[in-house]
Amino acid sequence: MDEQRWTDPAEQEGDSVLDISLRPKRLADFVGQEAIKENLRVFITAARQRGEVLDHVLLHGPPGLGKTTLAQILATEMELEIRLTSGPAFTNAAELIALLSEQTDRRAIFIDEIHRLGRVIEEHLYPAMEDWRVELIIDKGPSARHFNLQLEPFTLIGATTRAGLITPAMRSRFGIVCHLDFYPPEDLATIVTRSAGLLGIDIDPAGALEIARRSRGTPRAANRLLRRVRDYAQVDGCQCIDRAAADSGLTRLGVDQVGLEPLDRRYLGLIIEHFGGGPVGVQNMSVSLGEETDTLEDVVEPFLIQSGLLKRTSRGREATPHAWRHLGLEPPLAGEEGQGSLL
């Protein structure tokens, strides 16, 4: 996939520096996810009153919703030093033991994409999470010696976009499990307004809401679109990003009123115009579009399904009546679906 995906929630080049500058530092500044915030506020207060570290936390949900930001906020609220790493970064158990045994009091360890930890490494993590100890093995074979290394209490914060791939044994060791949902446009508009203030951009409520509505419920995409709309507004001589300026910039980026990009519209158009609305297999769609099936399944289809534009069935993909109307076409009457091309 060569074309730029402005609303792709996965991190892209240039996002990291921006995310760091825009990330809230305290729970009170974190916008959205109200139920999760309220629960975490209670757990943090209770742990601090007891003088204990916070129980291990698992954050799961689609990319770009603020899992890393929330992990850093938890460490700040608990006054813990935090170490950031990821599941694929560990190639052997010794690397994990070295991280866990660092002589630091009151700390948090954040492991992103924790479902990608190797099984052997995961086994070493269990006693560390439960009993604050790890087993250290010196030498091999009959001369191997086993030592239990005692650890300082710590909080493990795991994040994943694929919660179903986490083993039950690992999941059961997290005392706090939080699922982050997509953000409604109102919350995203608040985030866009806050980011605009930090970046020195003038934006009115209507302009912020227009960007929010096209951001697929994802703060990372909203901040990325805000930067690009700022560029268009600056070149066009707009002093303040209003709804018209936001609409103009987003339209030129190819992001339509519900957040669909050119590949999304080609995908729906192909199902409707070439396959009569479906059902059609993903392999056929991959060949017809010249895209990998993984790209379609992981990047294109999730938002289309969430928006009610696409259905996955046992027979293949089907465009919903909402998809027909979004492309300016009249959906077929009941019983006429899949009757062939419209052309």
Image (cartoon, grey):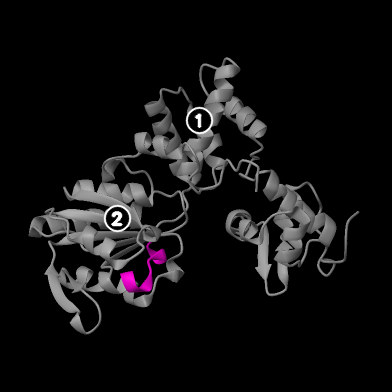
Q: Which residues are magenta?
A: 113-121
Name which quarter of the figure residue 314 lies in: bottom right
Would you say residue 119 sits in the magenta stretch? yes
For this rendering, which residue is in front, 286 or 57?
Answer: 286
Q: Residue furthest bottom?
A: 142
Q: Position of residue 142 (x, y in %)?
A: 21, 85
Mark count: 2
Tag 2: amino acid:
Phe
Residue nearest the viewer, comparing 162 with 38: 162
Q: Amino acid at mark 1?
A: Arg
Q: Nearer the viewer, residue 39 or 174?
A: 174
Displayed quadrant of residue 293: bottom right
- Residue at the (55%, 41%) spot, across then down: 213
Q: Position of residue 99 (x, y in %)?
A: 23, 58
- Please report whichever mark, 1 or 2, sits nearer to the chain's N-terminal start: 2
- Where does label 2 land, which residue? 110
In front: label 1 or label 2:
2
4 and 136: which one is in front?
136
Q: Quadrant of residue 148?
A: bottom left
Q: Is residue 82 left or right of residue 164?
A: left
For residue 227, which numbered disc appears in the image? 1
Residue drawn at 35 percent across, 34 percent down: 21
Please name the predominant secondary structure of the magenta segment in the image.
helix
Dot 2: few (<14), some (14–19), or many (≥20) neighbours within 10 Å? many
Q: Residues within 10 Å of mark 1 (few under 14, many from 20)?
A: some
Label 2: element kind:
strand
Mark 1 vs mark 2, CA separation in Å: 28 Å
